[in-house]
Amino acid sequence: MTRSAIRHMILVLLLTIPVVAETATRLDLIPYAGSIQYADTLAKDRSTIAGLYGYYGIGAKHSIEGDAGWTRIDYDSGTLSRINQYDTTLVYSNYGLLDWKWRAGAHLITSNDAASEGGILMGGLHNYEPSRFSRGVDIYLSRYKDYAPALDVQQVTGSWGFYPRQFPKTYVQVQGHYIHLSDEIGFDQQSFGSAELSLVRPIRDWTVTLFGWAGQQVFGVQKEGFVVYNLPEKHQGAYGASLKYAVASTSSIKLEFVQKHFEELGATVKARASQWLLFWQQTF
């Protein structure tokens, strides 16, 4: 997938948003920043993350999400001492089909490491009933044209969310991921599967989230297309938690921690990554 193809997809997304009669709009801006510390890797030392996420709701039927992120990976040895990566994501969602939602978008990765540059097209269809359940499927098509050889990745993610009768204020979501690579890149397999569980519980002005997943992911897409793992690593699971506090009716702050486990291509030991992220949300 070329950059021009990604730009064309973004243009198509913008042009498919109709002019709607509703005048009610909502704008959320969420700047974020954080760091990752690595252990038992071949050469990685740490990473720094910063970015801005935005959500724009148009009436009750349309929304646009965008994210511009920067990641710097520092290495303590090797010929490449630092990678600077830029991620740009744009997603359009439509809620006009009764209790159905469809979404389409693109995620573009640029970097000073050509092999990790790529583009992802995404689409999904979800059925939901507010405060009761949500279920759906998302498809991600990734292309890394400068990987040797050029690599195509297909991912299917199914999700099911609900509020248990015994705990009506707790939202539970279960996800399953299937990933297939166009070539075997060194892990002796081309298909990978994993399962994910998350729990969200509001407590007055606080929102507590617990999450984790297990299985295998290579060049996986997470967080509904906003997070992409684009290095030759076999991720084998992660767990974490976040704590969000409503500072006011239109602003909140969130702290998130994630512990990740993965295997680098060519490594003999499993590596770990400890990630901290801080978010600020402002609604206009």
Image (cartoon, rainbow, N blue to C red):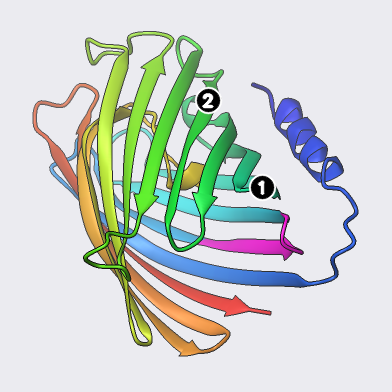
Task: Give residue 168's quadrant in the image.
Answer: bottom left
Q: Which residue is mark 2?
A: 142
Q: Residue at x 41, y 32 (%)?
A: 157
Q: Earlier in the sequence, mark 2 or mark 1?
A: 1
Residue that lies at the very extreme toward the left in this rendered image: 269
Q: Does residue 56 belong to the magenta stretch? A: yes
Q: Front-most of 84 and 50?
A: 50
Q: Nearer the viewer, residue 86 or 184?
A: 184
Q: Is residue 193 above or below residue 203?
A: above
Residue 163, image x and y in percent?
33, 60
Q: Nearer the viewer, residue 13 or 84?
A: 13
- Label 1 packing within 10 angstroms: few (<14), some (14-19), many (20+): few
Callout 1 amino acid: Leu
Q: How many marks?
A: 2
Q: Relative to 210, say whether 283 is above or below.
A: below
Residue wearing tag 1: 98
- Which residue is painted at 61% across and 45% down in the image? 101
Q: Give residue 106's position: percent from left, percent from top.
A: 63, 37
Query: Is residue 249 shown to the viewer in this render?
Result: yes
Q: Which SS does the magenta portion mostly show?
A: strand
- Residue at position x 69%, y 54% in the image: 64
Which mark is in front, 2 or 1?
Answer: 1
Q: Is residue 3 above or below residue 199?
A: above
Q: Position of residue 17 (x, y in %)?
A: 82, 47
Quadrant position of residue 9: top right
| Magenta-highlighted residues | 51-61
User: Is residue 172 shown left or right of residue 12?
Assistant: left
The amino acid type, in three-letter code, at marker 2 is Ser
